[in-house]
Amino acid sequence: MLGALCTLCTLWAAPGYAQVGIVLTVEGDVSVVSGKQECGLRYGLDLEEGDTVRTGEKSWAMLSLLDGARITVRPSTEVRIEAYRYTDSGDAPQNFATLMLVRGSLRAVTGAIARGRNTGYRVRTPEVTLEMRGTDHDITHVAPQFTPVGDASPGSYGKTHAGVGVIKNSRGEVTLSDGQTAFAALRANTPPRLLTADPLFFGLHAYIDRRAAAVGESASKPFLQ
């Protein structure tokens, strides 16, 4: 049954939608909503603009996008590929990517779209937008009904591991450099603010990231040959 559903996902192509990348590797209960179909993710499955990736508890996926970006979708996460445009010959303003993080957490090691001064790589949550102007970024949306490890307040957390990131809401913005983390509270009437220490759930994220990176590196070899 799962194989049949995956075939349906692969065959479905909504008018105007195009491939933006592939599923590099998955672990656990992970699915994609593509058009009107939902199926379990598998290695090598094409991803299209408009697709939504969902991971269950203790499950994750790594996505490889056309510009070379790697997206680690961590446990208990829902993320939608809202918009994606990339061509090798395109000028920087013509290449862009926007992801909508409904809940959960992801890590983005960006590709060609975010090189130089281009600000075309964005992740949105219900509170904030994170503009990525560097290589390695982290964003988490803690919804009230989903409680991560530790005492984390509901809202959005952004962190820059390498490069520069700008996290903003309707009240203001803050710029993040290497190792800095910012937080915007849920439905707050205040701008994002820098944190002096990472929430405890970042420790679990680091474990998932190391595992995903090791498995993803092995899985990517057939696509590089």
Image (cartoon, rainbow, N blue to C red):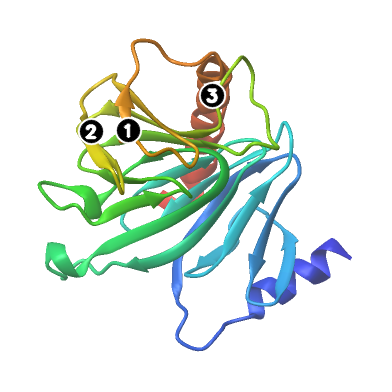
- Upstream in sequence: badge 2 or badge 1: 2
The residue tagged 3 is 205
Q: Is residue 221 above or below residue 33?
A: above
Query: Residue at point 31% right, 26% down?
Result: 193
Q: Nearer the viewer, residue 202 or 145?
A: 145
Kindly identify the amino acid type of the residue bearing the numbered disc 2. Val
The residue tagged 1 is 192
Q: Is residue 65 left or right of residue 115?
A: right
The quadrant in which residue 34 appears is bottom right
- Rounded to the nearest angstrom, the CA distance separating label 2 from label 1 is 6 Å
Kindly identify the amino acid type of the residue bearing the numbered disc 3. His
Q: Is residue 45 left or right of residue 15?
A: right
What residue occupies the far front of the structure in this picture? 189
- Upstream in sequence: badge 3 or badge 2: 2
x, y (%) of residue 194? 30, 22
Query: Residue at point 56% right, 33% down?
Result: 215
Q: Quadrant of the N terminus?
A: bottom right
The residue tagged 2 is 174
Which mark, by number, is residue 33? none
Kindly identify the amino acid type of the residue bearing the numbered disc 1. Pro
x, y (%) of residue 209? 51, 27
Disc 3 element: helix
Circles 3, 1 touching at the beta carbon (< 8 Å): no
Disc 1 element: loop
